[in-house]
Structures are given as C-alpha cells and as structure tokens.
Amino acid sequence: MQTGLFTGETIYPIMYRVRQHMEEREVSDIPAEVMTQLDTLDLASALKDKRIAITAGSRGIHNIDRIVKSVVDYVKSKGGHPFIVPAMGSHGGATAEGQREVIKGYGIDEDTMGCPVLSSMEVVQLGTIENGAPVYFDKNAWESDGVIVVNRVKPHTDFSAPNESGLVKMIAIGLGKEKGCSAMHAYGLAKSIRASAAVSLQKAPILCGLAIVENSRDHTFCLKAVRKENFLEEDAELLKLSYSLVPHLPVDELDLLVVKEIGKIFSGTGMDTKTIGRIRVRGVEEPAKPDIHGIVALRMNSHSYGNALGIGLADITTKELVDQIDRKSMYSNLIPTTYLERGKIPPHFETEKDAMDVAMRLFGHGAGTSLIIAENTLQIETLLVSEAVLKEHPELEVLESGLELSFDEGGRLML
C-alpha cells in the first residue's frame, strides 16, 4: 500500500540513545551450575541405563543451547541415554519437522547436542481435569524412563496466575503438543494449566525439572533444579522472582512506540504484551501501564519462520513484514490460542518511512512527541528516546545525544 494520505514533511523529534540500569548478575559457568543443581536431587539411580527425555522449547532463552547440552552431558555422566523432545505446543507450524527446525535455529540438533532429537506431534491422553479439558502428553516422552523438564520461568503474555510461563506450562502445553495447546486455550489457560500439569506429574514419567530465571538483561540469572513433587510450588516462587527482574519501558504513558523487530524469538506473541501494555484477550484486564497511544512494528525476525503472531497488537506495520507472513505457520499457532485479535493485520505501508510518517501524523506532536524506538520488546536495556521522554526520566543514562532519524533510499530506518 502506498501512503498518499498526507502531504508535507514529517517533523520528528531529536533522539537520544539511553541505557536503563538493570540487574547484571548472571551465572558465569553454565555446565558447572547445571551439574551442581542436578546433583542436589540425587538422580544417579534414576538415570543409570535409562532413556531420558529432555525438553527443548521455542522461546529465545539466553544460553538455551548450552543449558540443554549441559543436561544431556549430565545424564550421560550418570550412565543414562538422553534424547531431546521439542516441547512447544503448536509452534513450528504444528508439525514435527517444523518444531525440529525451530530448535535447530537455537543451536539444538543431534550434532550439537550429541544425542537424538525425537520430534513428533503424537500424544497420549492421560485424563481429563475437572473443567472437562483433556490432558495430553508427548508420546516419545511418555515412552521414556524419565523426563527432565527444562524451561524458563517468566510472566505469561496472556494471563496472570500463580503459575504462568515456566515448568508447569511446559508440561501442560509444551509437552501437550498441538492438542494440548488447543485444549488449554479452549478451556482457559489460567484455569487449566496448573490442573493439567498436576495430572501429568501424577501419571507421566516426569523425573525432575531445571528452571531458568533470567535477569533484566535477559541473561541467565539463576538455574534451579526442582523435584517432581515440588513443581507447582517452586514454579510459583520462581515466577515471583522473575517478576522482580522483568525489564519495563521507562514510561507510564507514551505517544508512540516503534518496535524494529517482532517475532517468536522475543515473545510468544511477537511483542511482549506486558511490556507494551496490550493483551487483547477477552475477559483479561488490560494493564494500567504503560499506556501507549500508537505502536508501529517494522520488521519480523527471520527465526519466526513467517509466524507474525502478535502483529495485531500493532497499529501500523510495513508491507515488507506483511509479505513475509506464512499464514499456515501463523494460523496453526493463532487458532489454537483462540485469540484472533492478535493475528489481524493492521494498516501496512510501502516503506518504514511511510509507516512512521503516518504514525507521527496520527499519534505524534512533532518535535514534542514522546517517542521510543526499541530493537524488540525483549532487549530493552538500550533504547532510543525523544527529548520529551528524557525530560520525564532523567535517571536514564545518555549514551548518545542529538540523533536525527534518517532513512535510506528504500525508506528503511537507519538509526
């Protein structure tokens, strides 16, 4: 689409590159910490000569390849025979090969891990929870002698509850594959995930968990081995820790947010809903802050494989991003969630400059616009902010001053 809607030059504010001060502590030796944590569970007899399934999910978790490889090596050191199962619900186009490709993009395959990767969408049904939702479990993991659940614990983009995104969700949805994902969303995530995981913990050969919590810079803050009988409680406690470390945009209200890249590698919804203050799920209250008047999404990360889920959270986007959408991939993820609003394509324009020009006309105030440009919604320690934002938040560390927004000959944002 061509703009052709406005005439005259768009006046943009002068920008500043700033840094937010965030928690910097992180695990320095991943293999050693994995070994230390798993040793606390006394797993030797449970691993020796046993086929052990290790989960690998579909989020952009820092060090995930090193963490999974360390778990693989630990199982081998105890005489076990590890294999990896992709545990990502309906992601990867809801196909076995698609899920294999997703984790390969994170550096997890048979060559790098030194063990088989068994990817399948086959599941077994373990039962039904009180509200009627069926409980499904990955068939390869079900047939193992033990499952080690590896996942990051963090706030979920769709709901708030004692257990959100973490070990519990990995069991209910990740290991539930497409059928489990569809069932949990259809019956309500907040009401179903914990109960579904409880059934799997009772009936499936789950051995233990290794929880990951990241710091405000999205680096590995801590690793925690969790006993099977403590999954629900430990996951809830680690979620509280994660909430205390989650980075936020340094504003309560903003005229315009420009997100350079969206994608599954950054958030399950392409843009983190709690970072941008938009959830768009019927029955779920919208966050009180930040209140962002307009959002522009410019590009899609290549590791999304055409899945632009979350594009509906933006007000404006680009033709380039829309042209990259693989509808089969996106709809196979969108439809099981039932949150169709997040897959609706907003007005899209020929170039990034066109998209931003329109956004400035609709949401901006010329040089006085409160504007933030973020690389994505996961890494927001460093941002580009306008003077209006900086005046309200002098605590931000200024790295570069007086930056003018510019675009190349193709209308692509260069700053």
Image (tube, rainbow, N blue to C red):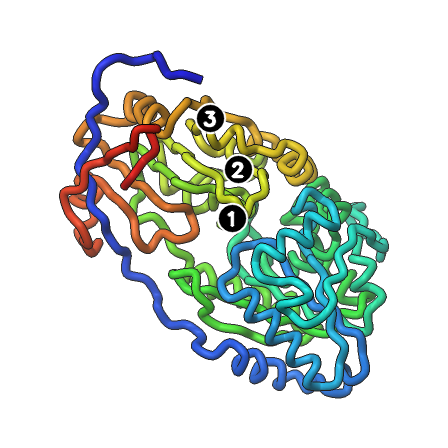
Q: Is residue 338 visible?
A: no
Per the rendering, the mark at residue 319 is 3
Q: Residue at x 34, y 12 (%)?
A: 5
Give the quarter of the figure containing the N terminus.
top left
Q: Is residue 343 visible?
A: yes
Name which residue type carries label 3. Answer: Lys
Judging by the rendered image, the residue that carries numbered circle 1 is 267
Q: Earlier in the sequence, mark 3 or mark 2?
A: 2
- Mark 1: give few (<14), some (14-19) or many (20+) Cα within 10 Å: many
Above-or-below relation of 236 to 380: below
Q: What is the CA distance from the residue labelled 3 to the residue labelled 2? A: 16 Å
Secondary element type, mark 3: helix
Percent coordinates x, y for residue 221 in the rendering: 45, 70
Above-or-below relation of 413 to 102: above
Secondary element type, mark 2: loop
Name which residue type carries label 2. Answer: Gly
Q: What is the CA distance from the residue labelled 3 to the residue labelled 1? A: 22 Å
Q: Earlier in the sequence, mark 2 or mark 1?
A: 1
Percent coordinates x, y for residue 105 in the rendering: 58, 55
Per the rendering, the mark at residue 310 is 2
Above-or-below relation of 339 to 233: above
- Mark 2: give few (<14), some (14-19) or many (20+) Cα within 10 Å: many
Q: Nearer the viewer, residue 197 or 141?
A: 141
Q: Residue at x 65, y 62 (%)?
A: 109
Q: What is the CA distance from the residue labelled 2 to the residue labelled 1? A: 9 Å
